[in-house]
Each structure stands twice: as C-alpha cells, then as structure tokens.
Image (tube, rainbow, N blue to C red):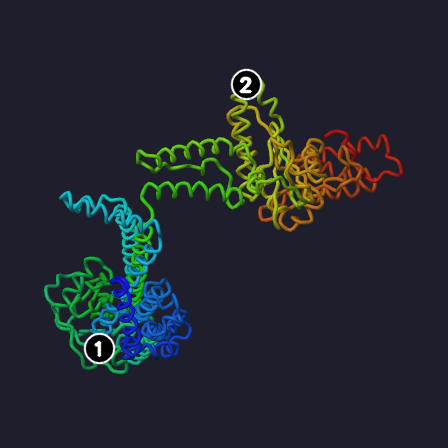
Amino acid sequence: MDKRKILFRAFDLLVGAACIAWFFFPVAMGPISSGISFVPYTMPLVYHVMAPEVLGGYILFLAYLVPLIGVFKIASPLVKKSLGGFADPMGVVSSLFSIVATAIMLYAFAFPLTRFADSRTYFYTLPTVIIGIAAGAFVLNIAAVTGFIKILNARDAVYREYREFKAMQKTLGKERDQKPVSFLEFLFRIRSKLFFAFIGIISLILVVLSVLLLNNYRTTILKAVGDGARRQVEQASSNYRINLGDSIAMFEYLNRLVDLNKKAEFAYESLVLYSNLKDERFLDEPIEALPDFRVEYSTLQPGSQFPLGDSLPGPVALTYLKGYSATRNVLSIKDAEAGTIRYVSPIIKQDTIRNGDEKIRRERLLGFSVMTFNEDVIMRPYYLTRVTVFVFTSMFIYIAVILTYIVGNYIVNPLLFLRMNVRKISDILTNMIRGNSRISANTLVYNDAVHSRDEIKSLSGEINDMVTVIRGIIPYISASTLKHAGKGEATSGEKELTFLFTDIRGFTTLCEGMKPDEVVAILNRYLDLETEIILNNHGDVDKFVGDEMMAFFEGPDKEINACRAAMQIRQAMMEEREAREKAGHPVVSIGIGINTGPVVFGSVGARDRMDFTSIGDTVNLAARLEGANKAYGSKTIITEAVYERVQQKFLCRELDFIAVKGKTEPVRIYEILQEIPRVIPKLEQIRELFERGLGYYRKRKWASAATAFRKNAELFGDEPSKVFLERIEHFERNPPPPSWDGVFRMTVK
C-alpha cells in the first residue's frame, strides 16, 4: 500500500471515529431562555416538537446517517473484499460519504443559528465545546472536499500526464539551478487569475449586498419601532394632560398599554410618566435649571400612583427639555452602556394667564413621558437575519471556492472565455428556435473576450465572423421559419391559428415624389410599429408584402391577443396620423382583417429555398377581410369564429353577412370597436343604432333601417352606416328579388 493510500485510509478512520463521537455530543444550542443544548441523537425529534412547521427541521433527520457512515468507514477495511470499490479509501463513494457526513455536521450547527441566534448574548453563552465541534467539522469537510478533488484528478488520464510533466519539469529545474517560482509569478498563472477573480467578484457582490440589505433592514426596524414609540409617548403625554388629577382614568390607560405590550412584537421595558406640579415652569421663559421629577405613573406598576422608583434628576430633565425645544419632536436617546433606547416627550399643558385685560396662552411643563426599550428586543429580528445572511453568504462563498478550484483544474482562461461567449450565442439561438425569446439580431452579440495571440484567438475571430453573418440573416427570417429550421428537416401539419392582415391605406399617395430611400424609411417606420405590437402580444410576423403584413397567433388566447394587437396598432397609427397632420404631411390609415381556424402549417418551397408558412381558407379569408374594410369604411373586421372567442373582452358590432371574392359560402363579419374596459357611451350607442338598422335592413324595412343608419351617420360620422344608406337607396329604387338572403357578395379583393 503506497503512502497516499495509507493517508486516505487514516483520514477515513479519523472521519469514522469523529462521526460516531459527534452523535453523542452537544452540537448546537436552542433559544437562550430554553437552556436546551441539542445532541444529535435527540436533536431532530426535539426540534420537530419545538417547530414542526419549519421544513428545514426535517433535514436534521439526516443526522442519523452520520453514525452509520462512521461505522461504514471503520468497518470497511475488514470487509473490503465484500464491498469492493466501495471500501476503497481513494474511491469516489467513500470520499462522498465523508463530504456528506461533515456537511450534515455543519448543517446541524448552522441551522439552529438561523432560528435562535437573535442577540449577542446567544453567542456569549454558546458553549466552547459546541464551537470546537463545529470548527472540527469544518476542517474535516475541507479535507474531505480536497481529497475528493484529488481523487477526481487522479482518475483523469490527461491530468496524470500533466502531473508527471510538471514533476519532470521540477526535477529538471533543480538540476539546472532554476529559481523557484515567485509569488508574483504564481498570481499571474491562469489558474490563480481565474480563482482570485471569480472568488473576489462573488465575495464582493455577496458582502456588499449583504451589508446594504442588512443596513437597510436595521434602519427600517429602528424607524418602525421609533415611529410607533414616538406616537405612544406623545399619546401618553396627551392622556396625562387630559386626565390630570384623574388617577382612575390613568390606571385604566396604563393597564390597557400593559395588555397591548404583552402581544407586541417589539415590547418595551417600561413607560414612565414623571411629574412635578409644585414648581411652575413655562417654556417661554429662560430655564437654567429644573427640579427632580417624581415617578407618578408607570407600566411597571400600572395600578399605583407615585410608585417607588428613581426620580428623573433635574439636570437630565433639563437636557431632555433643551433637546425637545431645539426640534419640537420626541427625543430618541440611545444608552450604549445600558443597551437601551429611550423615547422622551415632555408633558406640556396650555395655560391661559390674564395680564390685565389681555389673556396670554403659555406652555407649562408638567413632566416627562419616557418609554424605554431594550435594544436586544428591538434588534432581535435584525440579529437573526444577520446570522442567517452570514451563514448563507459563507456557505455560498465556500461552495464558490470549491467549484472554482474544480473548474480551475480543467479550464484555462482563454478557453473559459471562449466557451462562455459561444454558450451565450448558442443559448440565444436556441431560445429563438424554441420560441422562448423574441427574434432580434440586436440580442445576438458576440463578445470577443479572448486576448491571447494563439489558435484560440483565431478561433474566437472566426466565431465572431460567423455570428456577424447570422446577425445579418436573422431579420429576414420569421420566428416560425427559424423555429422549425432547428429541426433540420421539412415538416408540415395542421394547426389552429389566428391570422391578422394589415394594409396601409394611402401609402402610394404618401410616397409620391419621394426618393426610394425615403419611401423605405417611412414604410419601415410603420411596419416596425406594427411588428413591435404584434411581438409584444405573443404573435409572430409571417411575412411582408409591400405595405401589407401577415401575422399569426397561437395558444389558448390567440384570438384575444390578435384583437388586442389590432387595437394597439390602430392606436399607434392614429398617433402617427395626428403627428403627421400637425406637421402638415400627408397621412395614411390602416385596415385590419382577423380570422381564426385550422390551416396547413409547414415548409413550402424548393429544395434550396424554402419558407415556413400557413396555407388554407382561414388565411385567405383573413386577407379578404382586410380588403373588405375599404368597402365598409371600417378599421378592423373579424369573423364570427373570432367574435365568439372575444365578445367578453371587446365591444364588437355585427357588420354584415358577406361572401368574399372566390368563395360562395357567406360568413358573418364583425367590427371591433374597443376593449371593454375602455368603452365609452358613444361606442355603445353606435353599435346599438347600427345593429338596429341592420335588423330592419335584413327585414327589408328600408325606411326604419335608413332612420337608424342616418342617425348614426349624422351623430357620429359612422362610415359603415353611410355604406348601408347607399345600399338602401339602391334597393328602394331596385328592390331585391324575393330570394334575397341579405348576403353581400364582394367582387373585388
């Protein structure tokens, strides 16, 4: 057996003996008031009785594994033939058992701290044996982790070769009388730079955040307690002044305060009212000295007037009065030696004194209300939180040290930087392909953090060039195409989707006389507005055709998302229209068509040039509805299938019963007026008048229908109503045949 194996075997026996001994010694302390010292063999059961609702307490039951691990480690040399590799002290299993056992030991010490260490006194009373056992467990844990890392390294053939090379270099260095590596050279080694940089940043972040959060928490507690104490002290002064001479009322008041204080989270030690009614002192005259003030009422003896107790000395009272006169606020006085915080308010009575025929109001000092808090009581949550933060911060830093050391054994800095940045690009592309993030070339940024002048730097430059090409391609690829391109093969299938088509009206007129680059800039401005809104509403832009756009939505709320996007697009376009009108520029409007239903969704195109798009009547009808807005003067038309899904969210009106070009089957169409939370009475009146007119129209009651439509047109300038007035005028001159079903058949797209 070689020296290393003997060392590991000795360590195993030490850990085994420590595990068994640990199980019978006190390892943690409960609340100071309880006097409980936790011993591992009873600790889980006792803690479960004390706090059964705390989930962390159930982990303490792992303490029963520790002596079992100890027995295993001591007995494993005797049965190594039966256990095989499990009994090997240089095996992974045995090393992991050591780490688990020592980690449980540390947890059994640290967890009670996070629950019961609510004051400095807790640590002052912590037995030395408990601290010693915890320190020993920590040392054993470090040794166990170090041994585990060495075992992992020894199992790596490349690492063994590296160690042999390093040993050989060391030997050659001695033969050539080379100087030993200096401390500065050690710091600039790749592994050292990685370790100190990583741990330094993590430690700095954790420590700074912990300090800031703890300071804020401490300030918040003191402010909350201080605000409450100031109110109570002022109230006590006010009650004394109001009930001056009425001891019964004061006794009732004090008893009520005592009852409330018993239930308070931050209970005060005492509230004492000092008085001196014999000597009249007015605040509007110089006061160079004050007499002593007797205790007249106290929560320590709420049923007694002038109970026994130390008087408030005159010099102290004078200090209180000067402090109050300077700020006219309740004083907060911290006594670090006594560990208390006092809140002091003078008891002042407004006296009216006659000076000849004139009445003068003067403030007379009757005494002082003093509320005293034990600082430990106030700071109990703060100390408990501080201990918890310290425990978790230490744990995270310790874990970070271990992980950094492990990573530092296998990775050098340039490779680490390269992998990190490549992984970022990979994650961004993966999320885009999976539809977990928005497709945007701006998010695909490669940060070339490799500064070495070697093959790794060349590789990093080549990756950067590749990312640049991808960034240039992404804006021309729809999300659906990119998502399905990740599958690596052409696919197709049927899906339920909602489609939204938009078309900018008057764009051709707007662009007359403009340069091509100006036309593109304006078009991109409008399309960018629309695209942003669609993406924000969980949709995807399928394609652009000139100033037209095709988008689709999927998921359980696809119809609602599509309609919401449509309303937001209309709002954005209206704001653009107003801005252009103010600037004296030509304006445009927009038409939107929305339909929902099944489509064939898949790869379409040639072998070397494909697109992923949707095909079917659902898509065609949505496109036709967008064009139908021209015929009705409307803004957003939806089908009945969409209306049934959104009628609880949007105010809509039935617009007509039409058969679009290329289709014989008529469909009922609706216009979205507004989201219901934003509906105004005007829109409801428009819908009511229009649908009333539409009902008469279908019954061929032309006069009644015309009355409703005309009112709508005159009051609100409603364009669809004007369209139906023209139809009614036509039908009055040329009545429809008896077979007329009210369907309007479009002859244009």
Q: Is residue 456 above or below residue 395?
A: above
For label 2, the residue is 514
Observer-nearest residue: 236 or 672?
A: 672
Residue 233 in view:
no
* Residue 745 coordinates in the image, percent (x, y): 79, 34
Disc number placed over residue 296 in the picture, else none: 1
Is 546 left, or right, of 253 in this rendering? Answer: right
Choose the circle earlier in sequence order: 2 or 1.
Answer: 1
Q: Position of residue 720 (x, y in %)?
A: 71, 35
Residue drawn where x is 57% and y is 43% of the image: 487
**Is disc 2 in contact with disc 1, using a CB cutoff of under 8 Å?**
no
Q: Secondary structure at mark 1?
A: strand
Q: Specify the label residue 236 is tagged with.
A: none
Q: Amino acid at mark 2?
A: Met
Q: Which amino acid, mark 1?
A: Glu
Distance between mark 2 and mark 1 Cα atoms:
92 Å
Q: Position of residue 399 (x, y in %)?
A: 32, 58
Q: Residues within 10 Å of mark 1 (few under 14, many from 20)?
A: some
Q: Quadrant of the N terminus?
A: bottom left
Which is nearer the eye, 193 or 28? 193
Picture coordinates of residue 68, whole percent (x, y): 36, 75
Q: Is residue 265 above or below residue 738?
A: below
The front one of 339 and 96 is 96
Q: Is residue 75 above or below residue 580?
A: below
Mark 2 or 1, which is nearer the eye?
2
The image quadrant of residue 612 is top right
SS state under label 2: loop
Nearer-the-camera pick, 191 or 163: 163
Q: Residues within 10 Å of mark 2 (few under 14, many from 20)?
A: few
